[in-house]
Image: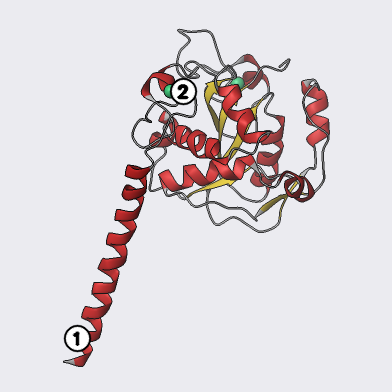
Amino acid sequence: MPRQGVYEKMEMQRLFKSVLRSVIPSAIQRLYPPRCLMCGRPGRDGADLCEHCHQQLPFNQTACAHCALPLPPNTDADAVCGRCQKKPPHYDQAFSAFSYQQPVIWLIHQLKFNGKLVHARLLGELLAECECVASMSVSESICILPVPLFRKRQRRRGFNQTIELARALSKKTGWPMELNRAVRVRETSAQTGLDAKARRKNIRGAFAVVETLAHKHVVLIDDVVTTGSTVNELSRVLKKAGVEKITVLSLARAPLNR
Ligand SMILES: [Zn+2]
Ligand SMILES: [Zn+2]
């Protein structure tokens, strides 16, 4: 039966490839076990962070349910901050994994300013551990959209840190990444040092949707959110283009005067 022989051969090849795929990473892990990026001890669960350093991270425990602004401890889980009550943002919900404190600042700076992409993998995996990620239904039509950089700026830097974070999150969650549907159409001056009003003005009209998104629920990824004006402007443009729901997921929510 030559036909069956072909299928058997294909099946053998498929099995061989899947065994190879599963053996090689574990062999690499055995040879080079993951080490904590902060202290060098063995990593926890195959991550580049040890259990001790994980426990030291400044998790954003109590925050506004709408914009992720840190709120005093013991505030209700569904509490909304004064600013969101006055003028709700265009996105539907926001979560920041951490408050803007050490050692998270160091982990982010190593990625952003020293190009340490291994930090993006760790930070993206930590984003995937956020409770909100587990709470988002797998049946929903979700895609991940990293906040785009202006093309020239990305070329100068060599990478976009939000894409690198999103890559690790996508690998963990299975949510697809959308990289080319929304673009930054003009270069904006740095938001650092500007007050909330100046930030809104600076970022207005900076984004455009070039192709309609197939997914109804977009998860926007940013590294650090301060006033939220960047993610809010991108959300405004995405909603105008027909996106139904937007969740902002960032590493840290920083104070304005950082
Ligand atoms: Zn450690
Ligand atoms: Zn708020």
Is ligand 1 less than 8 Å from the beta carbon at label 2? yes
Q: Residue at x 45, y 16 (%)?
A: 56
Instruction: Determine the residue positioned at 47% across, 47% down.
Output: 170
Q: Secondary structure at mark 2?
A: loop
Give 51 or 219, whichever is nearer the viewer: 51
Q: Quadrant of the N terminus?
A: bottom left
Point out residue 225 in the picture as x, y percentages from the top left corner: 64, 27
Q: Is residue 36 above or below residue 143?
A: above
Q: On the image, numbered disc 1 is attached to which residue?
A: 4
Name the residue: 38% across, 48% down.
139
Specify whether residue 219 is in view: no
Quadrant location of residue 164? top right
- Identify the residue shown where x is 71% and y is 30%: 229
> Would you name the residue on which mark 2 appears?
39
In the image, residue 140 lies at what x, y percent? 43, 47
Q: At label 2, which amino acid type do we have?
A: Cys
Q: Is residue 235 left or right of residue 93?
A: right
Q: Nearer the N terminus, badge 1 or badge 2? A: 1
